[in-house]
Image: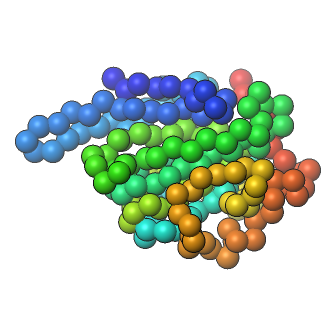
Amino acid sequence: MATITESTTISGVYIVEPQVFGDERGYFIESYRREWFPQGREMVQGNRGNRVAGCLVGLHYHLHQADYWYVPFGHARVVLHDLRQGSPTDGATQCLDLGEVDGGDNNHLGVFIPPGVAHGFASLSDMTITYLVDSYYNPADERGVAWNDPAINADWGVADPILSARDQSNPLRSAIEPMWQPHIQLRP
C-alpha cells in the first residue's frame, strides 16, 4: 500500500510514496488512486510532457484545477508555492525532487497539488512528467507567477534555465491582480 503524507510546508499538498513490486522482469507500481486524497477529486484528463535537461516550466497556478504529478523517467525539481489567501501556509515554498534522484533509482514519488498552489519544475536531466488534472484544460483558469520572484525564493537547481516566452513574462506575486488571487476553497 502506498504511503500518503500531507506536506508539513503547504496545506493540502500530498506526497505519495507508492509501493514498488519488482522481480527479474522489472517492476510494477500503482502511481495514483483517487481514494488517497481528501475530497476524492476525480481526475478527468491525463497529460505527458518530455523536457530536455535545463528546462524550467512554471510557476503556474489554477483557481479551480488540482494536479497530480509523477516522473517515470529522469529527474525533476518541483517547486510549490502557496498563493491562497486565507491558507494557514500562505506564502510557503516547498521544493522536492521527483524521479531518478542523483542518477540513481527512481524514487517514484507523486505529488498532489490543490488549486491556488503555484507549481513548476526544472528538468535536472532529460525527463518525462505525467500529470493528471481534475478538470479539462481551460486557459482562462491557468495563471502564472514569476519563477524567479524573490518573495518565493525557489531553489530550482539550474543556473540558466530554458524558459518559454510565457514563463519569462509572468508577474511577481505582489503584482497578481486581485481577481486572479487564489483563496482557500471549501468543497463539500
* Figure quadrant of residue 58: bottom right
Of 45 and 29, the residue lying toward us: 29
Residue 158 position (above or below residue 70): below
Work out whether 184 lies above or below 146.
above
Q: Which residue is at 45% across, 33% downward?
A: 16
Q: How many marks?
A: 0
Res. 37 in view:
yes
Q: How is the image coloured?
A: rainbow
Q: Nearer the viewer, residue 106 or 48?
A: 106
Q: Quadrant of the C terminus?
A: top right
Quarter of the image for residue 89 reads top right
Q: Nearer the viewer, residue 137 or 90?
A: 90
Residue furthest front in the image: 159
In the displayed orientation, state which residue is furthest to the right.
178
Q: Is residue 6 left or right of residue 109?
A: right
In the rendering, at what x and y percent does residue 88 appear? 77, 27
Q: Residue at x 76, y 40 (%)?
A: 91
Residue 44 x %, y %? 53, 46
Residue 46 visible in the displayed image:
no
Which residue is situated farthest in the left direction here? Answer: 24
Is 44 on the left or on the right of 24, as rendered?
Answer: right
Q: Is the N terminus in the top left, top right, bottom left or bottom right quadrant? A: top left
Q: Quadrant of residue 134?
A: top right
Q: Is residue 46 above or below residue 9?
A: below
What residue is shown at x 70% (from left), y 71% (from top)? 168
* Left or right: residue 31 compared with residue 56: left
Which residue is drawn at the image coordinates 46% and 26% (left, top)?
4
Expressed as whole percent of the image width and height from the top left, the position of residue 169 reads 75, 71
Q: Position of residue 113 (x, y in %)?
A: 60, 41
